[in-house]
Amino acid sequence: MQYGDEALLEKIAKLKKSRNAVILVHNYQLGEIQDIGDFVGDSLELSQKAAKTDADIIVFCGVHFMAETASVLCPDKIVLLPEVHAGCPMANMINAPRLKEEKKKHPGAKVVCYVNTTAAVKAESDICCTSANAVKIVQTFPIDQELMFVPDQYLGAYAAAQTGRKMILWPGYCPTHARILASDIARLKKEYPQAKVVVHPECRSETNALADAVLSTGGIIRFARETDAQEIIVGTEIGILYRLRKENPGKRFIPVSEQAVCPRMKLTTLESVHFSLENMTHQIKVPERIRLKAKAAVDKMLAVS
């Protein structure tokens, strides 16, 4: 906590109360942002929390597609994204026109869309999935149904391996998780032979193969809480380490790579949250035509989950 932050925190608290706002914070955000969150979690979990809240305003401390998902599920609320430049490189690796073109090549395929996408891409998909339920969603389709998985090739490959299904994989990926290498895990396992290894399914396939568990951020949080292991090697964006250490003070958490940083997740600051609440910026609103189609894909997933 830097000098002057206490006054800033007080201003944020007053604005939040006066505007009847709720602050949602993704697990990869800076520690100081996690500390002001009413809810801290993964993207879909946070949007579901938003749908249940009585707040008039949702301040989403994450990246653009997350705020869009909140807008899809909460059309009656104002959704604010404090940092307008907080985008997601993987979500930007696909768009609705390109997906439409690919669907023409595979007219019989059903599209399974990772939630880490724009609302427009969700609107062109048959069903959404998260990193936590991708395997379960894929299993809902008949074995002979042709499937296209967008946009994360590594999550898609993981779901395909777990289900024995062949899928058309879009060549997208998360640059942050791509930096988490199998060679780093092999080295750390020698250094910490008693440690358990948990990684996110956005990691490369060879990285996932060395893990004791492949889990979403929410799954990693639960794993850390429930495991008897006192040392845990963590393969995901390092922002999650703040929450892991805060909630499990008796355990040691070792990042697979200190380079696993999403710079866009780190754009949000206390100053930008204050500015956002004070000036009601930047408002994220999904057009109704797209919202309804995107919501249908999300609702199908929620019905399965």
Image: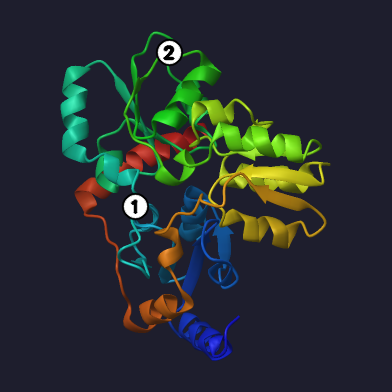
**Alpha carbon of mark 2 to alpha carbon of mark 1: how far?**
28 Å
Residue with the mark numbered 2: 142
Looking at the image, is 124 positioned above or below residue 82? Answer: above
Q: Is residue 278 left or right of residue 25?
A: left
Q: Are marks 2 and 1 in contact (CB under 8 Å)?
A: no
Quadrant where the N terminus sits is: bottom right
- Residue 245 horizontal side relative to residue 40, left or right: right
Pointer 1 local density, CA inside 10 Å: few below 14, some 14–19, many at least 20: many
Residue 32 appears left or right of 126: right
Q: Is residue 128 above or below residue 271?
A: above
**Which residue is depicted at the point 78% across and 45% down?**
231
Q: Position of residue 139 (x, y in %)?
A: 49, 20
- For label 1, the residue is 72
Residue 108: numbered disc:
none
Secondary structure, mark 2, is: loop
Question: Does the image show residue 54?
Answer: no
Which percent across, then down, holds residue 277?
39, 79
Q: Position of residue 58 (x, y in %)?
A: 42, 67
Question: How does the figure colour the protein chain or chains?
Answer: rainbow
Amino acid bearing label 1? Val
Q: From what the image shows, is residue 278 above or below residue 75?
A: below
